[in-house]
Amino acid sequence: MFTGIIQAVGHIVRMQPQGGDMRLYVAAGKLPMGDVALGDSICTNGVCLTVVDLPGDGYWADVSGESLRLTTLGELQEGSPVNLEKALTPQSRLGGHIVSGHVDGMGEIVSLREDARSIQVVVRAPDALAKYIAHKGSICIDGTSLTVNSVNGAEFDLNIIPQTMSETIFGTYQPGSKVNLEVDVIARYLERLIQGDAAARAGELTMDTLADNGFLR
């Protein structure tokens, strides 16, 4: 688990295709690596990756075909900057929100504009994820925990303060940039819970399902 508070910006050193998936070598930048062991998790642009080798100044990680299809990792190039966060410990401060590192889909930066000392960023989510994004709710973008200012259909806007701009890869975004999105885990589980017994059967959540499980009168 993670908090969405970025600890360092690293960069991709090497990308090695491995017969359908990928092995990445990530330089860790200022991320302290002294307490990182093989098998540990590091959130890399919002994706939870397992450390498989420690060359000293960074880490190697395997990226599955599923992750390559559903995240932006497959679109990165050698030299691309990435947000990094080590996994939580029992002593960690939960400064952001609960982040699993399991990306739900890719969004797209629609616009960026100055708003006093901050930058207002509008992001378009896939239609299937729009229902999980709420006004003043939490959203994780490329591993960064953020608060949703407002929602308009599948688009939502964020206020990015100077600290976030300087300490994450937000400063590299342009209209059209693809980003990894992870919605609030509570919203995902709440939808499944509301389905009740119907969760064991394939299909969308319907008004009949809500009524059958006592959520409507």
Image (cartoon, rainbow, N blue to C red):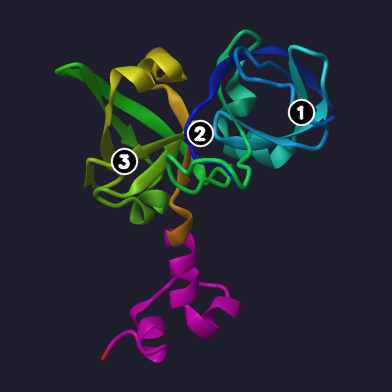
Viewer-proximal residue among 155 and 93:
93
Count the labels in the image.
3
Q: Position of residue 146 (x, y in %)?
A: 36, 37
Residue at screen point 57% across, 35% down:
71
How far is mark 2 from mark 3, CA to CA? 13 Å
What secondary structure predominates along the stretch shown in magenta? Answer: helix
Point out the tag, 1 or 3, that comes first from the N-terminus.
1
> Image quarter for residue 50?
top right
Q: Position of residue 16 (x, y in %)?
A: 79, 18
Q: Is residue 160 visible?
A: yes
How far is mark 2 from mark 1, CA to CA? 17 Å
Which residue corresponds to mark 1?
Answer: 61
Q: Is residue 90 left or right of residue 207?
A: right
Q: Position of residue 171 (x, y in %)?
A: 38, 14
Q: Are marks 1 and 3 in contact (CB under 8 Å)?
A: no
Which residue corresponds to mark 2?
Answer: 143
Q: Position of residue 102 (x, y in %)?
A: 59, 45
Give the residues in magenta. Answer: 187-216
The crowding category of the residue bearing disc 3, from other C-alpha atoms within 10 Å (few below 14, some 14 to 19, many at least 20), is some
Which residue corresponds to mark 3?
Answer: 147
Q: Amino acid at mark 3?
A: Thr
Q: Is residue 127 left or right of residue 38?
A: left
Label 2's element? loop
Give the foreground label among 1 and 3: 3
Residue at screen point 28% across, 23% down:
161
**Which residue extends farthest front?**
91
Q: Are marks 2 and 3 in contact (CB under 8 Å)?
A: no
